[in-house]
Every structure is written in C-alpha cells, then in structure tokens.
Amino acid sequence: MSDAFTALVVGANRGIGFGVVKEMLRKDWSVIATARRPGEATDLMALAAASPGKLQILGLDLSNPSQLDAVVASLAGKKLDAVQINGGTAGPAHMSASQATEAEIGTLMFTNAVAPVRLARALAGSVRENTGVLAFTSSIMGSVALNTDGYHELYRASKAALNSLSRGLWTELEGRGLTLLTLHPGWVRTDMGGPSAPVSVEESARGLVAMIERERGKHRHEFISFAGEELPW
C-alpha cells in the first residue's frame, strides 16, 4: 500500500486493534490510533516512536460524547481511506440474561453496539468517497443464524445488536460511495479471547486488513470473517 493511504483505528492500545495498527504500518499506511488513556498506552507509544511521522495517537473513550466530538472535529478536512472501530467488553462473568442487572446490560449494549455505531455515523463524512471503507470489529457470535448453543448469551446479543445497527447504518450510507464491513476477527488469543484461542493477534490483524483492502470500492455491506468467509446474519 502507498503511504498516501490513511486509516483511523479506534481502540488500538491492545489486542486486535493494536495488531491492526501494526499490520497497517507494516503495509505503509499512515495511521491515527485512539486509546482511552493514551498516556498509559506504552506499547502504542513505543510503536509511534519507531514509526516517525506514520502514527498519531489520540485519546478517545467511546462512552464520552465530548471526546467523540473532539476527535471528529480534529479530522475536519481530512479524508480517511479506512476507519476500523474496535470496542468491546465480554460483559458480566455470569453471562446470563436471567441474572444480569439493568446496569450490566446497559454497559454491555452501549459499549459493544451503540457507541461504535454512533462513532461511525459521526465519522462517515470523513471517509473517502468511492474507495473508503468503514469497518466494525464484530463477532461470529453475533450471527443469529449460527447460534446453535446459546453460550454467552448476553455477549451474543450485544454483537447481534451491533450487526443490526450496522445494517441500519448501511441504509443511510448506501449510495454515498462507501463500503461498510462488519468483521469477525476469529477467536483470538487476547485478554478477552484467552490463551487457548486458536488465532493469533497477528494472523487476525493480517486478515482484517486484507479484507479492508479487498473490499475497497465495492460499495456494499458485508458480514465477513478475517479469512474472507461470508457469514450469515
């Protein structure tokens, strides 16, 4: 990729988001990365120091509307070739809708579904027309069609909500020359995925960036895996 390509990666201080930043830099993208507490994002800061002029770090807590507005304002006049929004929590340890409190459900749904779509809607005008890609990191667990065991039902519901909201967002964006992706990163060895997950962060990130590159200019909304598999909603 040419260094003329610029991406915004949200939730980039660790895990999949950090892996995506590293992969984009490896492919010569310029990257704007966000972290809730950028002063504590030591790995991200080290990566920025090793990539002079290629990586900018911004503070962004998806639950803070004023920070969201500030990031959107800072991008005024800039065109992004890709936006990749990572943001998620596993939810309460009990994983049960029957045991969950209103506060637990509210936090889970807001973090995993509402906040990412709210940010995407605000950023859509900064995505380059005709070739730009707006992408969410979702999960195969958000597929209603593939829910055969009900495991981790609250997390599933939150990702299904993200998938539904992203589909609704597409009805607004269709015809504006953008591509919208709802991405499954695989079961990844992160703090959330655990040490027994079969997919490394590096493998997932390579696939996610490859999908963003592959889908540029296709002007559609797809639910696909990091390996390129089309998934049922």
Image (cartoon, rainbow, N blue to C red):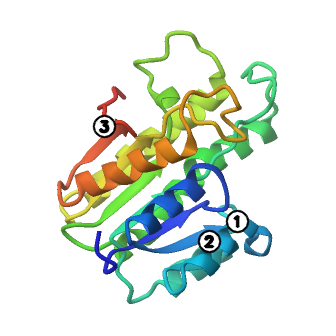
Label number found at residue 47:
2
Question: CA–CA distance between discs 1 and 3?
Answer: 29 Å
Amino acid under disc 1? Asp
Total count of labels? 3
Q: Quadrant of residue 105?
A: top right
CB under 8 Å between discs 2 and 1: yes
Q: Is residue 197 visible?
A: yes
Rendered location of residue 230, percent (x, y) = 29, 32
Rendered location of residue 79, percent (x, y) = 34, 80
Q: Is residue 107 left or right of residue 199?
A: right
Estimate how packed mark 2 is, as few (under 14), some (14 to 19) or many (20 or more) residues with alpha carbons within 10 Å. some
Q: Is residue 65 visible?
A: no
The quadrant of the picture occupied by the C terminus is: top left
Residue at point 53%, 33% (across, down): 199
Label number found at residue 43:
1
Pointer 3 or 2: first along the chain: 2
Query: As rendered, which of 167 and 32 lies closer to the eye?
Result: 32
Furthest residue toward bottom = 77
Residue at the disc numbered 3: 228
Q: Is residue 21 left or right of residue 87?
A: left
Which type of secondary structure does the marked residue at label 2 adopt?
A: helix
Which of discs 3 and 2 lies nearer the camera? The answer is 2
Answer above or below: position of 151 versus 82: above
Residue at point 33%, 71% (across, down): 81
Rendered location of residue 147, percent (x, y) = 49, 16
